Image (cartoon, rainbow, N blue to C red):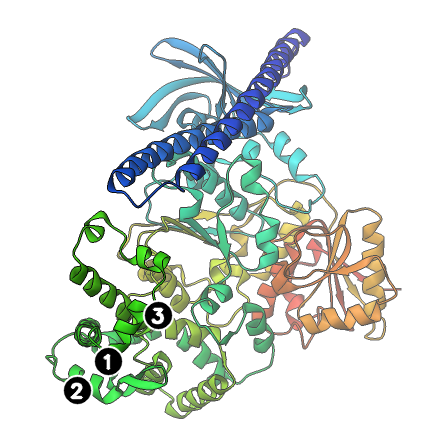
Amino acid sequence: MSSFPNESRAAEQTRVDHVETMIQQQLITTAQNLSKAQQERRKVEVNFSSNTRANYIETDDIIETNATLQQQKQLLAGATTNEDILTTKEKELHLLAGSPYFGRIDIQEDGEPDTLYIGMASLNDHDQNFWVYDWRSPIAAIYYNGTLGRVQYTTPVGPQTVELQRKRQFSIQAGKIKNMFDTNETIGDNILKSVLGQASSPQMHNIVATIQQAQNQIIRDVKTKVLIVQGAAGSGKTSTIMQRIAFLLYHSRRQVNADQMLLFSPNNLFSNYIAAVLPSLGEKNLRQVTLQAFLAQRLHGLQVQSLFERFEQEQTPTNPETQALRQFQESLEFVRQLEAFAKKADLTSAFQSLLFEGQVFFSAAEMIAIYQEFPTNLLTTDKLVRLKNTLIRRLQAFLQEEAHQDWVLTAIDDLSERQYAEIINTPKLRAADFNTQQQHLAQALVHQKYYPVYEAIYNNYFYNPYQLYKQFLQEVLYPQPQVWQAMITAYQLAMETHKISLAHATAVLYLQQLLTGTGRQQQIKQLFLDEMQDYSPLQLAYIQHSFPQAKLTLLGDLAQNLYQGSQDQSQLAVLEELFTARKTKVISLQQSYRSTAAITNFAKQLIPQGEQIQAFNRPGVLPTWWQTSSEQLAAWTLHCAQEAREKYETVAVITKTNAQVQELQKLWASQDKVSVLQENDHQIPTGIVLVPIYLAKGLEFDAVIGYAIQAPFYQSKSDQAILYTLATRALHDLQLISAPHKPRWAKELDQKTYQARIAQ
């Protein structure tokens, strides 16, 4: 790492000053041009609106009007595009203002030296000379990946090799260089320590200036069909994926836009927490959805269990048979049985009559008779398609006859002039004779009346998916039939109250989708799934099937598994088997950046293979593990939180269950500086917050107080994963409180990694 003479720093500051002036000048020009573009677009819109009210009666007028409208559409599209380009340019200039770049690379290519500066967006002058390169540009990869010497980077025309002679890092604020140094590292520790040592913020920030080499490989991967990122807590998984989204929007902007991307988020609070990242990079936010919401949208009239409800349910002690049942019900073996059933299922028991205006239009018996005429060797999906086609043909035949009924002639006579013109709506029809027009009107009216029947056939309303799913459950091979039958009974009882578990909801929809193909979203090109360890093989199989055109990016930490039936440390192989038909890559992130080294070294003891996690060398105090009496537990927790609040912006009291949050909320009702973090909050408030562990996942706080770390809340080995998740929410300070005793397995922890203290 190099220090600089004053003249070198002065020269760099002179360049910053010049770039800042250029940015301000371009902001003024762009704002003026944008205002003109907006005026032009509004003018075109007014002309377009007036032309849509033109004469549609005379044939010549129609031809002329259509030509004018087409011209106006082209003008409007051009004006809108110009406005969009200028709006994007203005956003990029605002991103650069004050901190125009954070890196510099000096390279030599084909004997020619060049100096490039890397920032949040590109900046060029009127002669198209680049003063700043976008961090997502191909050549910027050198800054993140390369050490001094010969390095290679990927371009649209293939790999290019250059000599990297210097890498310089900057910290620029308000147009002034605060820090700068040369380094041979990918990103120097000084910059990282400065960033990581800051207080937590209400929303996640981008990490463009501190992207590490392994993270950069994830961000710039454009070939892998299924990218699986297994990362330790605090390794920057979510931040990396947000930068990956921004990179893909830049790299593949001609093939994909934000509307063709979807992120599965663990909860709404987390969605709000990360919502500022993409706009801070100058990109539009992509759509986000939780698993529960995704399922509920497709199961109208049913209350779908949430992940939080599932976690609370699983805190109730259960016998080994029930635990094994839950795991099997979402396992890869269950998925394979479901997929096999979909190929050979007999739908006849699930058929239900289609009604129209309270009367049977197609009876279940009629459908069964049609279905049983099909060859027995046909797949169920093929039989279903043939049945639908047969029903539609019979509907069409009925409509042909119905068009001659008296009610149709009466309805034609009752049409207003406007209604008539809406049906006779093409030049060919307007020029047709009276009988042809009457026939067209009759067909239009009967089609309009009986459209609900067609819609019911198209949407497969002629069979009951829940009845078919029950039939599948009764055919499942399970080693304990009595336990399985009890589960089926529980499913039926829940359905009577319009409730359904996550496992059953997923299986019902997957079976229906396998049979009908409905619900598959072809328009999504990139799918991102956070906290993958919370998803079972069944849920992942359904999601993959729902988005057939999408490349998948899955990220998570298998050590933070809070839910029975989801992934564990041995199941990366299960994920690879699940996606075996697609190109899959697994990348592991073992460097943990969030917490101090002391907190990370304590936390990694709590999980299998924790020794693989590498703590970033950021100093801090050892975690404190308090012991107090049951009577003083709540009071001492509040005392610790208040002391921490004197030093830190955000202090989280993390409980295992929501019931504990409610309990503390009542006990601390007089404390107006304590708030409860809710799922739909838009950001993390400053001060002391109460939050259950399942809502704290993915978040970070300056200080964390772990509440009631004792039996019966923390006693099994699986509870260690929960404590690991809790501990790794802390940036700077971690305190655990037990009353009266720690869990038995705490004896296995290295006592040098924490301070054991008795509350006074």
**Residue furthest toward the bottom?**
482
Q: Is residue 70 above or below residue 286?
A: above
> What distance separates the C-alpha of mark 3 from that of mark 1?
14 Å
Check the picture and name the quadrant holding the C terminus.
bottom right
Nearer the observer, 82 or 97? 82
Give amino acid for label 2.
Ala
Q: Is residue 30 above or below residue 584?
A: above
Tag 2 residue: 369
**Residue furthest toward the top?**
7
Residue 717 visible to an observer of this rendering:
no
Residue 278 visible to an observer of this rendering:
yes
Could you tell which of marks 1 and 2 lies nearer the N-terminus?
A: 1
Q: Which mark is residue 709?
A: none
| Tag 1 secondary structure | loop
The reply, left or right, for residue 701 in relation to residue 482 is: right
Tag 3 residue: 510
Could you tell which of marks 3 and 1 lies nearer the N-terminus?
A: 1
Q: Are marks 3 and 1 in contact (CB under 8 Å)?
A: no
Report x, y in % for residue 158. Answer: 28, 27
* Residue 562 picture quarter: bottom right
Give me the residue at 45% from left, 10% from top: 127
> What distance separates the C-alpha of mark 3 from that of mark 2?
27 Å
| Tag 3 secondary structure | helix
Q: Is residue 4 above or below residue 404?
A: above
Could you tell which of marks 3 and 2 lies nearer the N-terminus?
A: 2
Task: Give the label, 1 or 2, closer to the camera.
Answer: 2
Q: Which mark is residue 345?
A: 1
Report x, y in % for residue 20. Answer: 62, 17
* Residue 220 picture quarter: top left
Give amino acid for label 1.
Ala
| Tag 2 secondary structure | helix
Report x, y in % for residue 381. Answer: 21, 72
